Image (cartoon, coloured by chain):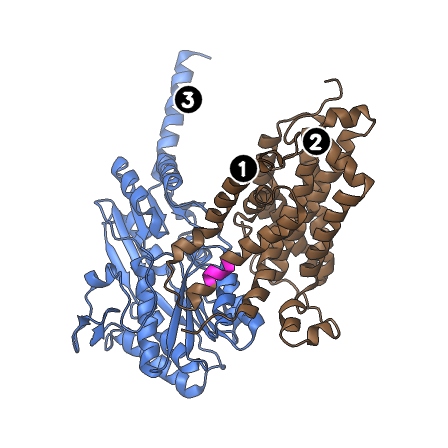
Chain colours: A blue, B brown
Amino acid sequence: MSIKTILASATVALSLSTAAFAQDPTKVGFVYVGPVNDGGWSQHHHESVMEMKEHFGDAIELVEQASVPEGADAERVFTQMALSGADVIFATSFGYMDPIINVAAKFPDVKFEHATGYKTAENVGVYSARFYEGRAVEGLLAGEMTKSNKIGYIGSFPIPEVIRGINASYLEAKKVNPDVEMSVVWLNTWFDPAKEADAAQALIDNGVDVVLQHTDSTAPQITAQKAGDVYTFGQAADMAEFAPMPRISSIIDVWAPYYIERVQAVIDGTWESDNTWDGIGAGMVGIGEITDAVPADVKADAEALRDAIAAGDYHPFTGPINKQDGSVWLAEGEVADDGALAGLNFYVEGLTGDIPQ
Amino acid sequence: MGSIDPLVLLAAIMMASTPILLAALGEMVVERAGVLNLGVEGMMITGAIVGFVAAYESGSPTLGFVTAALGGALISLLFGVLTQFLMSNQVATGLALTLFGLGLSSLIGQSYSGLRAPLTPDLHIPVLSDLPVVGRVLFQHDAMVYVALALVVGVWAFLKFTRAGLILRAVGESHDAAHALGYRVKLVRLCAIAFGGALAGLGGAYLSLVRVPSWTDGMTAGAGWIALALVVFASWKAFRVLAGAYLFGGISVLQLNLQAAGSKVPADLLSMSPFLATILVLVIISARKKGATAAPAMLGRVFHASQ
């Protein structure tokens, strides 16, 4: 083989490979905190991603990694993804916040999207849903449906997102049922089916007959089903397999349209750091079907509340609302602003117990 | 808010303690034979998934438990062959067994998530179950709760009164002496390892078939490690394993109940209380003269006939 042919074939190879580069699909990475079959939060992100993948087809290349612990491991995973050529990386848990900011600083050309966080940068956008709007609807249903006037709430970590949900559901339950009491059980985990089942059982043993959960598995649903006369709500995913009882409705996270929009922006080169916080109105929070276990008039009330929130006519945090210690938080008619909600770290008046610090 | 009903709490504790009771009891027998198997978590989760698959496919929880015991025993024999015949390090092999079990269970379980196990019925014992108060608390559980209790008595009697139990303890205290007497050290140890695996498998299946009851990745969530701590906590005695399991299960259930009842005690303090209790008991045990020597003398040592 002469030098000439080698050079010629090298040129051909080179031009071929540049052509290939030009058509290279956009590489999109996703990182989940739990397994993609948890039945809730992580599974629902994964399913939304599958919808997005279907939309783009071969125009994107997808990389997913599940069960990544929050902390140092996460930083390694993000770095690895960025090094292997990802154009945009979605981090789908609150605890990824600092790792993503650190990694983003090292890879200015890679775009990052962080779910439920609040730290942004030039190449880091954040997105979350106004879950508290859905919690308000659940609170109304819970207040109406409870016979023992005791509602239970399984909390994960004491972060603003979870505390907002507790306050929003309690306020609405109290409105329709002044005698209602709410007990909160903190588990300090997003996902531990045995612990979640035990927590649900403990609540039921203490006379609770409506259980709300802010953890990711379906274990509380099964426990409630075994116990009999107990109502629950699907969390993150519809959990329709437990309808009509115990699951009487659900909050569904609708991520797919957001994923499609943001990936499209990366492909078009128009991506900019954003701070998206959408609710029922924008379609990011869905309320799952309210089952026939709920009386028709209660169902109508819940749907009216849902629609009023969607239309922007009603805000779940509208004064007068006092803090747990009795001091005034919101005066008559005052609406909580997003800044206050983002950092919410106290219970409203009427809730008992302390938030673990 | 309302106060906790101690009887309901006791019933919840009996259920919550069963997985760690089974696993710890099995590990205790293994350690009494002089083998340290750190793979309890891996054997538990293997039992959880194979038990779930068998019960789901056949519709019979009983078959699920039997399969879980066989599955746990089988995977523990992997550890047995590696450590007893190939002389591998027990600590490293046990840790590897945990990692292997977690991965294997995840692989087997891929298409079984979100499904529900067939219901394990609660026993209804004539007369006993109908007793007021006591009947509801003590005599209306599923059969596995009583199997676990019977196993505690069985293991205690086996180690204390039978010749086979004596041989097992001899192997654990001095394998050279046992070997010189003509006992087959490796065979005894393999049997003990398989028994430990079977019980860990049952404990895992109790999670996936009764307590949760469905399959999710990594659902044992550290129960195997608690079982390991429990064996030391119980200073290698069957009835202390029972007491320890109820104490551990009790505290974790109690902390949830206290929260649910609106107690003022901080939740994070309650969450770590089982572990604080372990440390405390370990300190007390090792402070006593006798306690320091409670561990089987050959625990974790490799046996080779030529030595």
- Asked if residue A193 shows in the view, the reply is no
Magenta-drawn stretch contains B254? yes
Residue A287 drawn at (x, y percent)? 39, 72
Q: Residue at x 24, y 63 (%)?
A: A341
Amino acid type assigned to the residue bearing label 2 in the image: Glu
Chain ID for label 2?
B
At label 3, which amino acid type do we have? Ser
The residue labelled by disc 2 is B173
Q: Which residue is mark 1?
A: B286
Mark 2, Cα crowd under 10 Å, few <14 / some 14-19 / many 20+, is: some
Q: Position of residue A121 (x, y in %)?
A: 22, 46
Q: Is residue A90 left or right of residue B111?
A: left
Query: Tag 3: Cα neighbours inside 10 Å, few (<14), some, or many (≥20)?
Result: few
The answer to whether B274 is drawn above or below residue B103 in the figure is below
Percent coordinates x, y for residue A92 in the rendering: 37, 51
Foreground label between 2 and 1: 1
Answer above or below: position of A5 versus B174.
Answer: above
| Residue B41 is a magenta residue | no
Q: Which residues are magenta?
A: B252-256
Give the Cα distance between marks 3 and 2.
Answer: 74 Å
- For the residues beneath circles 3 and 1, the answer to whether they share a chain is no
Which residue is identified by label 3? A9
**Residue A113 in view here:** yes
Residue at x-position 57% and y-position 59%: B16
Looking at this view, is A102 or B183 the one in front?
B183
| Main secondary structure of the magenta stretch | helix
Contact flag, marks 2 and 1 (Cβ < 8 Å) = no
Asked if residue B135 is positioned above or below residue B41 in the image, the reply reads below
